[in-house]
Amino acid sequence: MNFGKYIAHRGLHNIDKGIPENSLSAFKNACKKGLAIELDVRLTKDGKVVVFHDKSLKRMCGVDSEISELTYEQLAAFKLKDTDEKIPLLSQVLKLVKGRVPLLIEIKGGQGLFDLEKRTYHLLKKYDGDYAVQSFSFLSMLWFRIFASNIARGQLISTYRGKLKGKDWIKYAGRLIGASPVVWRLVSKPEFIACDLKSVSLEKAFQALDCNADFITWTANSDELMNTAKQFSKSVIFEELSDDFDFSDNWSEN
């Protein structure tokens, strides 16, 4: 899967300019610059696939509820970071992008076993454009491998521990399993590995190569980090770069 060198993390967003992450305006902005888009999907209470990163609405909408607890009609009442932008449906994003740039869709957690995978695949089957799916869950990627093998898939990995509390340890343990090359070879069999820059290493890059998987990294949030990361990554997921960052080499040597 060829994303180009640069992938806009949750769209090309800039909240200082009134463009929040995972919004239609952020995706439109990325399309204008010809940049691939990374986005996140979750399921609402009534089974709609929406584009939203967090489990909770607190950070982006100031509401102490979870996506899975509300219907899409209820979610439509909220705005993203006090802008006029609302939480979009995946179907709305697909209609907006129309195959102009590649899409990298992260499958987040869902309330039913593989419900999110099934509903996302149902929407993608009708989409005429380049796209891939990725997840920290190797079981999610196993589902796509078995039931939608035509879709390019990537294993998200991060071994960065940070400060863990409570159930964070369970999530971290799952991520360690997903970061194992044994799991890549036997379970998820990804076409690419998407590695956290906080836990990147030459060993991981070679492990991806040994599995015939491309190596991409996330999330470069400065010009300096981006220029370093793109030297060893086929593609780099980025955000918060300077307005004058040069994207002219996006499709060179790919």
Image: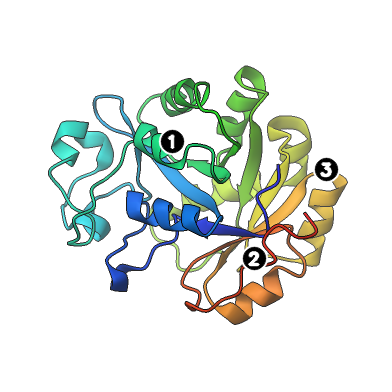
Residues at badges 3 and 1 in contact (C-beta under 8 Å)? no
Q: x, y (%) of residue 246?
A: 61, 74
Judge depth for marks 1 and 2 and give the one in front.
1
Question: In the rendered structure, which amino acid carries the disc numbered 2?
Answer: Ser
Q: Residue at x 81, y 61 (%)?
A: 203
Residue 110 visible to the viewer: no
In the foreground, 191 or 25: 25
Q: For the view shown, which residue lies furthest in the bottom direction?
A: 224
Mark 2 surroundings: few (<14), some (14-19) or many (≥20) residues within 10 A:
few
Judge depth for marks 3 and 2 and give the one in front.
3
Disc 1 and disc 2: Cα gap in Å? 32 Å
In the foreground, 224 or 94: 94
Judge depth for marks 3 and 1 and give the one in front.
1
State the SS at label 1.
helix
Q: x, y (%) of residue 58?
A: 22, 56
Q: Residue at x 64, y 44 (%)?
A: 155
Q: Is residue 75 left or right of residue 47?
A: left
Image quarter of the N terminus: top right
Mark 3 surroundings: few (<14), some (14-19) or many (≥20) residues within 10 A:
some
* Residue on which disc 1 sits: 94
Disc 3 and disc 1: Cα gap in Å? 31 Å
* Residue on which disc 3 sits: 211
Tell me if residue 189 comes above or below residue 66 in the rendering: above
- For marks 1 and 2, the one nearer the N-term is 1
**Residue 235 tag number:** none
* Residue on which disc 2 sits: 199
Mark 1 surroundings: few (<14), some (14-19) or many (≥20) residues within 10 A:
some
